[in-house]
Amino acid sequence: MVDLQAPAKYQPKSWSATSGAVTPHSLPSTTTSFKMPSEETKERIIKAVDFGRTVLHYGWIPFIIYIGYTRSNPQPSLIKLISPLA
């Protein structure tokens, strides 16, 4: 049986800066110097993300139905996809 009161054999190292941990102050200054995007670029990114959300919102279910019909065995005809009475 395992003794839960016994001291742990594994002692993890601390995450201090002296143990070799990377801190934001220890990184070279070239990694933190970048240009902020302009307002026009920010607006274009926001518009692209909104468009992507709309496409994903309205296209997800038809995409899943398409995948189901094309990957099924036997593969049904297209008329059965369009008309429920066929």
Image (spheres, helix red, strand yellow):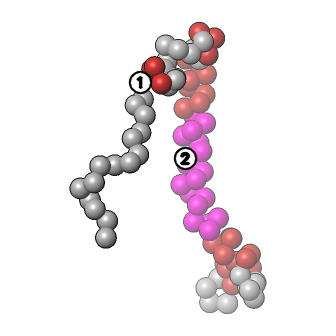
Q: At 48% across and 24% down in the image, what residue appears?
A: 19
Image quadrant assignment for residue 17: top left
Majority secondary structure in the magenta region: helix
| 1 or 2: tag closer to the N-terminus | 1
Q: What element carries label 2?
A: helix
Residue 61 included in the magenta stretch of the image: yes
In this image, 77 relative to 64: left or right? right
Q: Residue at (68%, 70%) from the top-left corner?
A: 66
- Which range of residues does the magenta coloring cover? 47-64
Horizontally, is 21 left or right of 30 in the view?
left
Q: In which quarter of the image is the C terminus?
A: bottom right
Query: Is mark 1 in CB contact (under 8 Å) with mark 2?
Result: no
Q: What residue type is labelled 2?
A: Arg
Q: Residue drawn 55% across and 47% down?
A: 53
| Residue at mark 1 | 16
Element class at badge 1 = loop
How crowded is the residue under tag 1: few (<14 C-alpha within 10 Å), some, or many (20+)? few
Report if residue 70 is visible in the image.
yes
Q: In this view, does 4 lie above or below 41?
A: below
At a point 63% along the width and 11% down the height, the residue shown is 30
Q: How far apart are marks 1 and 2 (CA)?
A: 42 Å
Residue at the farthest left position: 5
Residue at the spot of label 2: 53
Task: Indicate which label's residue lies in the foreground, 1 or 2.
Answer: 1
Q: Quadrant for residue 3, please give it.
A: bottom left
Q: What is the quadrant of the N terminus in the image? A: bottom left
Residue 50 falls inside the magenta stretch:
yes
Q: Which of 28 and 13 is in front in this view?
A: 13
User: Residue 62 appears at what percent x and percent y?
Assistant: 62, 66
Q: Does residue 35 appear anywhere in the picture?
A: no
Asked whether 31 or 71 is in front, the reply is: 31
Q: Tag 2: Cα neighbours inside 10 Å, few (<14), some, or many (≥20)?
A: few
